């Protein structure tokens, strides 16, 4: 009885051993291109997740005219960053409508990416060394610079006039950090988003609002009682942020940027949102 039971198991072990050793000796992993999606060496990459889900989830701004602004009437979110998100959906899924635009703020965007709530951040985000410790970035797709927005009749002319002045900024932005270094005598008040910061400026809660020039220009377009002063006193190269270590997705995004440049579509987008082709 014992023998009858043991023989098949022994044979099985032998067969298994032969199969495994056979696999190893023939072990040229490059022949695995026809393998059945067996990419188990790493957790599933973002591109696979997007394809399985059938849509890209992009973290974008809802409060930033020109880059990502939600129209409360139509519910549509529009801007330069939004069109890039649509182009990425088209490149990966063949359909630019297959994108969900989730709202992020300057403070929430990195945690939302790290939690897996969004696939990518496309939200006026400056590439910095500090942020590179938490996320990976695409190539630069826009060059902004920090400036100041003040009332037309304000005496403030630039950083040198900010001593004792209340300056409004947004939490989690490079702007809030930079202004403390560049104007240490200013009093910095931080808000959750740009809508709130601009409302506070209009309500006289501060005399200047600071962030990227292009965001301030968007605000000024909605209310010409305000002007930009002080020039650009930082360099803010925008990049799209991706979860750390997903080099395949970074390459995909960079190839999108390259094809937008090569086709002239980048210039068209630039002109559509910012009024002129890039210099
Ligand atoms: N580009 C700056 C930053 O990444 C300011 C704009 C923003 O807050 O998104 O912090």
Image (tube, helix red, strand yellow):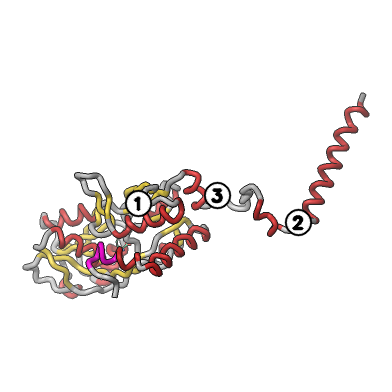
- Label 2 to label 3: alpha-carbon separation: 23 Å
Question: Residue 48: x and y, percent?
Answer: 52, 50
Disc 2 element: loop
**Nearer the camera: disc 1 or disc 2:** 2
Q: Quadrant of residue 272?
A: bottom left
Q: Main secondary structure of the magenta part?
A: helix
First in sequence: mark 1 or mark 2? 2
Where are the magenta residues, as a range?
270-275
Quadrant the N terminus occupies: top right
Disc 1 is placed on an element classified as loop
275 above or below 81? below
Residue at x 12%, y 59% (from the top left corner): 223
Looking at the rendered image, the disc whose residue lies closer to the viewer, 2 or 3, is: 2
User: Of residues 176 and 239, which is closer to you in this image?
Assistant: 239
Where is mark 3, residue-wise?
44
Tell me: 245 left or right of 171.
right
Q: Are marks 2 and 3 in contact (CB under 8 Å)?
A: no
Residue at which label 2 appears: 27
Q: Residues within 10 Å of mark 1 (few under 14, many from 20)?
A: some
Respond yes or no on whether mark 1 lies under 8 Å from ligand 1: no
The image quadrant that residue 219 belongs to is bottom left
Callout 2 crowding tier (Cα within 10 Å): few <14, some 14–19, many ≥20: few
Residue 137 visible: no
Whether residue 105 is visible to the viewer of this picture, yes or no, is yes
Q: Could you tell me residue 246's position as x and y percent?
A: 51, 57
> In 3D space, how far apart are the residues under numbered discs 1 and 2 (Cα atoms)?
46 Å
In the image, which is nearer the foreground, mark 1 or mark 3?
3
Residue 108 marker: 1
């Amino acid at each position: 009885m014992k023998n009858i039971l043991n023989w098949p198991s022994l044979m099985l072990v032998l067969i298994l051993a032969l199969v495994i050793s056979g696999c190893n000796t023939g072990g040229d992993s490059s022949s695995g291109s026809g393998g059945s999606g067996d990419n188990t060496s790493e957790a599933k990459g973002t591109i696979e997740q997007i394809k399985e889900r059938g849509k890209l989830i992009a973290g974008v701004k809802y409060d930033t005219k020109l880059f990502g602004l939600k129209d409360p009437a139509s519910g549509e979110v529009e801007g330069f960053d939004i069109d890039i998100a649509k182009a990425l959906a088209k490149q990966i899924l063949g359909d630019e409508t297959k994108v969900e635009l989730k709202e992020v703020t300057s403070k929430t965007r990195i945690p939302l990416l790290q939690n897996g709530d969004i696939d990518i951040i496309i939200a006026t985000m400056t590439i910095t060394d500090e942020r590179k410790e938490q996320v990976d970035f695409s190539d630069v797709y826009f060059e902004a610079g920090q400036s100041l927005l003040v009332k037309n009749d304000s005496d403030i002319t630039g950083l040198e006039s900010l001593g004792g002045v209340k300056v409004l900024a947004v939490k989690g932005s490079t702007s809030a950090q930079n202004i403390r270094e560049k104007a240490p005598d200013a009093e910095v008040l931080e808000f959750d988003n740009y809508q709130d910061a601009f409302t506070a400026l209009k309500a006289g809660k501060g005399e200047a609002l600071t962030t990227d020039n292009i965001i301030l220009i968007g605000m000024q377009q909605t209310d010409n009682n305000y002007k930009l002063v002080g020039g650009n006193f930082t360099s803010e190269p925008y990049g799209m942020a991706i979860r750390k270590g997903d080099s395949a997705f970074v390459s995909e995004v960079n190839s999108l940027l390259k094809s937008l440049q090569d086709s002239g579509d980048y210039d068209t987008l630039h002109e559509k949102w910012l009024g002129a082709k890039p210099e």
